[in-house]
Amino acid sequence: MSSPNSNANANPIIKYVPFQSKSDPSFWMKLGDHKLNTLRLTQDPIDIQGTFTIQSTITHRGTHEDSKLSSSASCFPGRMRFDQDSIDISSSITSEQEDDINSSNTDTTIQPNKSNNNNTVSVSNENVITHGKIQILNTLESFKTINKNELLNKYCLGNLLKACGVDLLSEEFLEDGSGMMDDTTTSTTSIQAALTAFYCLCHLDLKSHKVLYWFAFPVLTPAPGKSIRYSSSKNDSTLPPQCSLKRAWGETKVRHLHEAVHQLRLENIQIPHPAFFIIVPQSQQDGHDDDDHDINNNTNDSDNTFTSLKCLHFSFQNYENLSEGEKEKCMFAFLDITSNTLPEQHEHDNDNEEEEKNKDTEQIPVGWTLRNLIAYLVLKLNLDGDISIISYRPSVIRRIEQESIAMTSTTTSTSTGVNDSSILLQVQLPPKDDYKWPKNSATKGGENNNNNKSTPYTCVGWELNARSKPGPRSVNLAPLLSPAHLAQQATDLNLKLMKWRMIPNLDLQRLSNTRVLLLGSGTLGCSVARTLLGWGVRHFDFVDNGKVSYSNPVRQNLFDLVDCERGGKDKAIAAAEALKRIAGPTIDSKGHVLTIPMPGHAFGEKEVDSVKDDVRKMQQLIDESDVVFLLTDTRESRWLPTVMARASNKMMINAALGLDSWLVMRHGGNVPNNRLGCYFCNDVVAPENST
């Protein structure tokens, strides 16, 4: 690498485009479910992952004049995406499972998912997979008052420093900030995990289905006034410090670059796309001293002096394994997903030399990950002076399947080089000391950014909101959810809150799966059904032979005046329909119109078949139910259901109201030799007609 320029401060400052988060609604829905069912009241950060890759851009056709007007740099930030697959529920369930993971030889935080069939690739190797943490705060107040910069330094700075080979200065700093990555900081995956990490702070309002969140993409930053700058081109003063790779190399060499990257991916199809890599030119003549000059020179395709490029995974070990000559010639590259228009893309359409010169001085912003790459080169690899870095921007990145390897040809890899937008950057690496912040230094906003007492280093990276100002973003999921889902989730939320705070042994799943039979759909039947609905019961069978009258709605809360019209609806059917209207179609409620045979109530010969059908139907309903509620309004109507429930050993709950008394009792459904007395056990008078 060459020595620093004496006029470095006159060179332009490198501009970066921060990541933007792109979270699908499925991500927040799954996270809310995970919070409700697994995390509960804990506020500890959990591990999640994101992805990013080259994003599609739309090129507008236009005239020559339009090209001139649109030649100024336009930029679209790269997006890091999060969906339901970003959350691994199994990683935060029990301590026993965590012990199993820790005892495994594989690094589960970076190991791609594989199916049982070793010949099948389940990882999307066209994406870069990133790892980070998300912290869900229970209250909106805590979200507003928590120190965001201190949080970023606490959980993210330790990883960055360890990956960059910086010795941490105290155990206090290690206490909570170093758990995102193991101590093996020389491997490709651990370096990439640290240099592309993220952090998210959020508050989930589970009742209103609103999410307030703030992503951070932490990068090590030099001290104030120590900005990283471009350098002059090392070998050709006609090239600006930032120019298209095609202009600097020519199309053939650019194709060699794509071939090298494609070959690297073919050799490692089981892992995601690399975010960083090392480029080493392979010359025809061993020991050629001009390769470094040639690779940065704008020559014709016929003048190329190297046959290929070698692409290596970005790691400390791979760099150390290079020879001294290869270290001098090698360059570093990063996948830049920023979409922008190069100021020089129409250069062949312009004959005005002065205009061309102005375009060369115009710089476009580059990807956010370059900041951590430069920090790693300075702090870990101890590089200084001028260096060439490639902003790698293929037109598209396609997934590589196992079955396609045998059919792979150079056409696959070179096809992306035709519309390549990669940029060659000449960067002046800062001294190591530039990354050390002075004590009590402040940001432009006046906030002390170096608030970590244990180290002079700091990181920044909180995302801008939709108004391009520092602040959180929000999303309202309610319009995306069906009313039935909203009703069910709201009911579940209330029950789970009761379970967490008051009744830890409450089995909500058992309640949800319980089928109840309500014998009687009057005042007691309606009230019991509404109460059971509030406790999460979802399967109901109503039995009644009456119809809704105009005196019922004021006392029986499942009916209204519409049910009384035209002689009145059947109570059992009207009650079942009302539950579905109240709680949504997820409720399984049915109405059965039948008469319960009663002692003391005679019936004629013509009614024998009908009575037998009613008895068979009621016996079937009792057998299919888990709990029977006996809610009729006469004593004799309770006799036959009580006998049937006892014969089937079903749990029965009797509820009876009188003018000056009431009774609630349970019997049946008990273990053998532990029988409970039924409604009639203490009676000395047989049931008779009480009407």
Image: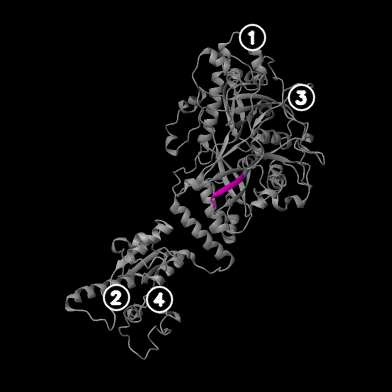
- Judged from the image, the secondary structure of the residue bearing numbered disc 2 is loop
| Residue 164 placement, left or right of 395 | right
- Residue marked by disc 1: 353
Q: Which residue is drawn at 37% across and 64% down?
A: 575
Nearer the camera: disc 2 or disc 4: 2
- Judged from the image, the secondary structure of the residue bearing numbered disc 1 is helix
Q: Do the residues labelled 3 and 1 touch (CB within 8 Å)?
A: no
Q: Are marks 4 and 1 in contact (CB under 8 Å)?
A: no
Is 2 rendered above or below residue 314? above
Sequence-wise first label, 4 or 1:
1
Residue at the farthest left position: 606
In three-dimensional space, the C-alpha distance between marks 3 and 4, rounded to whole angstroms, equals 87 Å
Mark 3 is on which residue type?
Ser
Q: How crowded is mark 4: few (under 14 residues within 10 Å), some or many (20 or more)?
A: some
Which mark is on residue 651? 4
| Residue 572 placement, left or right of 289 | left
In three-dimensional space, the C-alpha distance between marks 4 and 1, rounded to whole angstroms, equals 94 Å
Q: Which residue is drawn at 52% across and 35% down?
A: 265
Confirm whether the magenta stretch covers residue 289: no
Quadrant position of residue 475: top right
Magenta residue span: 208-213
Q: Are marks 3 and 4 in contact (CB under 8 Å)?
A: no
Q: Are marks 1 and 2 in contact (CB under 8 Å)?
A: no
